[in-house]
Image: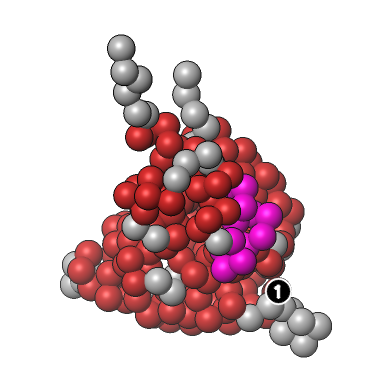
């Protein structure tokens, strides 16, 4: 009996190989040939599955952003303001890009490519409606989608610039959160309270733990199943 080709298994192997290579070398330094060679498949199989390298990134972005706000909620104390969830989620993203240059490369590209950026905007807009709807009672989810294009652009800009002794991580967080909260009309007192609380948290330590856990989850999720 002829053996049936396992296209799903091949795709999972390529995604697993891409995770390892992106974390080891960065998105831009990884060649498509390295991905399909490491996965033990052909050039044709790769392009049939993803079309191009950005197709691989899209799959990873969908996985990474699918539950980011839910994970942020687990880190927020009960009774905290809703805006704290947004502050934690976005601040951890910024912290992750300061922890690893390869993750900076990956995240900046995710916010740059039209397909992945649009997925992030659409995925985030429903969360923004849930978090900031009370401050914008006349806004629909579509309005928040449009506003997320603005805050997402700010996020990408701050991600792309590494911190220095002059532009510290604390200043980056303050500048980003202040600008984002202004977009979503967060009251001034709440804005100051949330920013102050965020600055008291060891975000880089949390980010390092999340990176380790996320890496393991990605590898396990895309591992070949028997």
Q: Is residue 209 above or below residue 128?
A: above
Question: What's the coloring here?
Answer: secondary structure
Q: Residue at x 37, y 50 (%)?
A: 44
Residue at the bottom extreme?
Answer: 166
Instruction: State whether the magenta stretch is mostly helix, strand or loop.
Output: helix
Give the side of residue 48 with respect to residue 71, left or right. left
Instruction: Name the one closer to the observer, 39 or 68.
Output: 39
Rate crowding at label 1 as few (under 14), some (14 to 19) or many (20 or more) other CA atoms within 10 Å.
many
**In the image, residue 28 lies at what x, y percent?**
57, 68
**In the image, residue 150 lies at what x, y percent?**
38, 80
Q: Which residue is mark 1?
A: 169
Q: Quadrant of residue 105?
A: bottom right
Count of marks placed on residues: 1
Residue 90 shown in magenta: no
Element type at marker 1? helix
Q: Residue at x 72, y 84 (%)?
A: 167
Instruction: Name the one closer to the observer, 77 or 223.
Output: 223
Q: Is residue 16 above or below residue 109?
A: above
Q: Looking at the image, can residue 214 be seen?
A: no
**In the image, residue 120 lies at what x, y percent?**
37, 62
Q: Looking at the image, can residue 183 be seen?
A: yes
Q: Residue at x 43, y 36 (%)?
A: 10
Residue 26 shown in magenta: yes
Bounds of the magenta span? 17-30
Residue at the right extreme?
Answer: 165
Q: Is residue 104 above or below residue 59?
A: below
Quadrant location of the N terminus in the rendered image = top left
């Amino acid at each position: 009996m002829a053996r049936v080709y396992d296209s799903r298994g091949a795709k999972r192997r390529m995604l697993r190989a891409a995770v390892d290579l992106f974390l080891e070398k960065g998105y831009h330094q990884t060649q498509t040939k390295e991905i399909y060679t490491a996965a033990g498949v052909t050039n044709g199989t790769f392009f049939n599955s993803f079309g191009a390298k950005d197709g691989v990134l899209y799959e990873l972005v969908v996985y990474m952003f699918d539950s980011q706000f839910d994970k942020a909620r687990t880190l927020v104390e009960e009774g905290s303001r809703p805006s704290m969830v947004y502050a934690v989620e976005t601040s951890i993203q910024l912290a992750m890009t300061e922890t690893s240059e390869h993750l900076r490369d990956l995240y900046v590209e995710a916010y740059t490519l039209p397909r992945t950026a649009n997925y992030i905007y659409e995925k985030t807009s429903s969360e923004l409606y849930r978090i900031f709807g009370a401050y914008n009672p006349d806004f629909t989810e579509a309005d928040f989608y449009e506003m997320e294009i603005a805050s997402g652009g700010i996020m990408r800009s701050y991600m792309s610039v590494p911190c220095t002794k002059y532009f510290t991580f604390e200043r980056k967080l303050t500048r980003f959160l202040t600008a984002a909260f202004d977009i979503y009309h967060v009251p001034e007192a709440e804005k100051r309270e949330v920013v102050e609380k965020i600055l008291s948290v060891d975000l880089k330590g949390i980010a390092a733990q999340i990176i380790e856990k996320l890496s393991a989850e990605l590898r396990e999720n895309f591992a070949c199943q028997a």
